[in-house]
Image (tube, coloured by chain):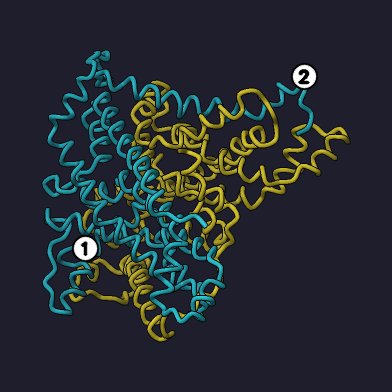
Chain colours: A yellow, B cyan
Amino acid sequence: MIETALRPLTRAIGVKAWPATELPRLTSQGILYTLLIVSALFMIVPFLWMLSTSLKTDQYVLSMPPQFFPWPLTLGSYVRLAELFPIGRMFFNSLVVATLTTLGQLLTCSMAAYAFARMRFRGSSALFLAYLATLMIPFQVTITPLFILMRYLGWINTYQGLILPGVFSAFGTFLLRQFFLTIPHELEEAAFLDGASHWTIYWRIIVPLAKPALATLGVFSFMGSWNAFLWPLFVVRDLELMTLPVGLATLHGRWLTEWNLVMAGTVITVLPMLAVYLLAQQYFVRGVVLSGIKG
Amino acid sequence: MVGQRGIRYVGWISLFLLPSLIGLTIFTLIPILSSLALTLFEWDLLTPPRFVGLGNFQRLIQDQNFWAALAHTLSFIAGYIPLVMVIALGVAVILNQKLKGVILFRTAFFIPVVSAWVAVALLWKWIFNPKFGIFNYLLGLVGIQGPTWLFDPQWAMPAIIITSVWKDIGFVMVMFLAGLQGIPTEYYEAAAIDGAGNWQRFRHITLPLLSPITFFALIISLINSFQVFDQVWIMTGGGPAGATSVLVEQIVKNAFSYSRMGYAAALSWILFLLVFSATALQMRLQKHWVTYD
């Protein structure tokens, strides 16, 4: 059953970024463009509204009819947000947590994937199947015992509590293993005859050849970690240790009606991810198809 | 395969495998097993755990909050899945054509996907604000008096569904685009020669050949929507009057606010059963309507 469930995934590894096949025209271009523009506006206008609200002075936030273009234009809510709330610290926390989680995942997943894809040992396929089986279990099942474990270890309100549970990923191992299997063996056989160790082969041959797969896993684990809410909600209470999403929820709880402050916070949270997306578009596209399974 | 003999080989395997294996054991495997064991106990973390057997599940069956949360989760799914699938398919078909500026449009649909759920939920909470939000203002422009949305037990769930569909269109769309890319253009050319119209080509070529991806996207969306949480927690907190209380929200409240660890664990296994049986059911149905190749 797991095999069947993962079949489309295995295929998707070969998916190119943004396909450009031409379908026969379903209808005239004019109608298509109208449809597209209307729906794209539906996607974009909320973000413009977010930005616009964050740039307003207090008295224009709650005006009716709404003021679409913020005037007078001001960065006042960003300044006030930074004064009232440790938003800078939260930004830093998010950055640290997302970066370390990503690096940790790339390292541990690629090493395990190397063992699964390139080394033969007894119990290998049974163990790999066990990895796959854990993918069927929703994260919420483990959250209560994990929370208890964190309390027991004294890791509530710590970076290790935020980071470590997210570092080890059966999904990432699966993803990289599938990719490693497609790398031909000739190169490493030659290297091995020259006396190269497994580490050399892993680090000098496999990892460089697997850069696209590593980048895909990398952007996705960064995004997952940057945007995560449920686990950080459990593991941090202290404002100074909150990541941006939990910080935003708290901010909203305190300044309920000051929407310019809250929207300034959301802009700060969304913009960095948007930048990452624009820089690494192709990996996101591939990653969506692949990461669906992670839920 | 190279270098497969001896103690040193075992050493290499351990080096590569152990970090992942130890980490997953501590942070995934042991929590899964403990979670299963925890369902048999009552534990508030202050007093020692008390064995209650299947008591948590008995309580669950009688718990109105649980049944309400289950019903709301299902109603979320009933609204969200058809909308997001149909809209995403439509957008994917359009965006798969060679049109000028297509990359820009694709980006527009993808921005919500990369944004944090908390940020998106706050944004839409503001948009749905009954008095000062732009949604009701725009409705007002076309002469519709909008409801109070998140403050109205009838309209809170639809508002959450609209928000979720908006956020996930791009996600599902990308899966469909990947599937559309795999359909050979010769099929369409052949059909065109045979005089098939646009709708016929869509119905008899696109849909059947897209069915594995449709099926895949459906399962993924279903699994994700059983776990709906962030948007509910931010937008309504389960309210008003419990109208949008969902399963994961119940897990979080029990574990977090009421310190009922065993009960929260029991709830989480119900969630697992739902996700698992939905997947299994679809695997069986798949044979009847999915065409591979």
Report the front residue among A76 and B283.
B283
- Residue type highlighted by circle 1: Phe
Q: Which residue bears the numbered disc 1?
A: B128
Q: Residue at x 24, y 71 (%)?
A: A60
B228 w.r.t. B12: above or below? below
Q: Is residue B188 visible?
A: yes
Residue A295 lies in quadrant: top left
- Residue type highlighted by circle 2: Gly
Residue B150 lies in quadrant: bottom left
Q: Residue A129 at what x, y percent from top left?
A: 53, 31
Pointer 1 indicates a residue of which chain?
Answer: B
Distance Cα–Cα, label 1 vs label 2: 66 Å
Q: Residue at x 39, y 54 (%)?
A: B289
Report the front residue among B168 and B123.
B168
B268 w.r.t. B292: above or below? above
Q: Which residue bears the numbered disc 2?
A: B6
User: Which label belongs to residue A236?
Assistant: none
Q: Residue A230 at what x, y percent from top left?
A: 35, 41
In screen coordinates, is A267 left or right of A280?
left
State the SS at label 1.
Answer: loop
Q: Residue B266 at what x, y percent from top left?
A: 27, 27
Pointer 2 indicates a residue of which chain?
Answer: B
Residue at the extreme front of the image, as rendered: B194
Sort mark 2 into few (<14), some (14-19) or many (20+) by Cα contacts within 10 Å: few
Sort mark 1 into few (<14), some (14-19) or many (20+) by Cα contacts within 10 Å: many
Q: Residue B64 at what x, y percent from top left?
A: 12, 35
State the SS at label 2.
Answer: helix
Q: Mark 1–mark 2 contact, CB under 8 Å?
A: no
Q: Is residue A74 visible?
A: no
Residue depth check, mark 1 versus mark 2: number of the one nearer the observer: 2
Report the front residue among B65 and A94.
B65
Q: Residue at x 45, y 55 (%)?
A: B212
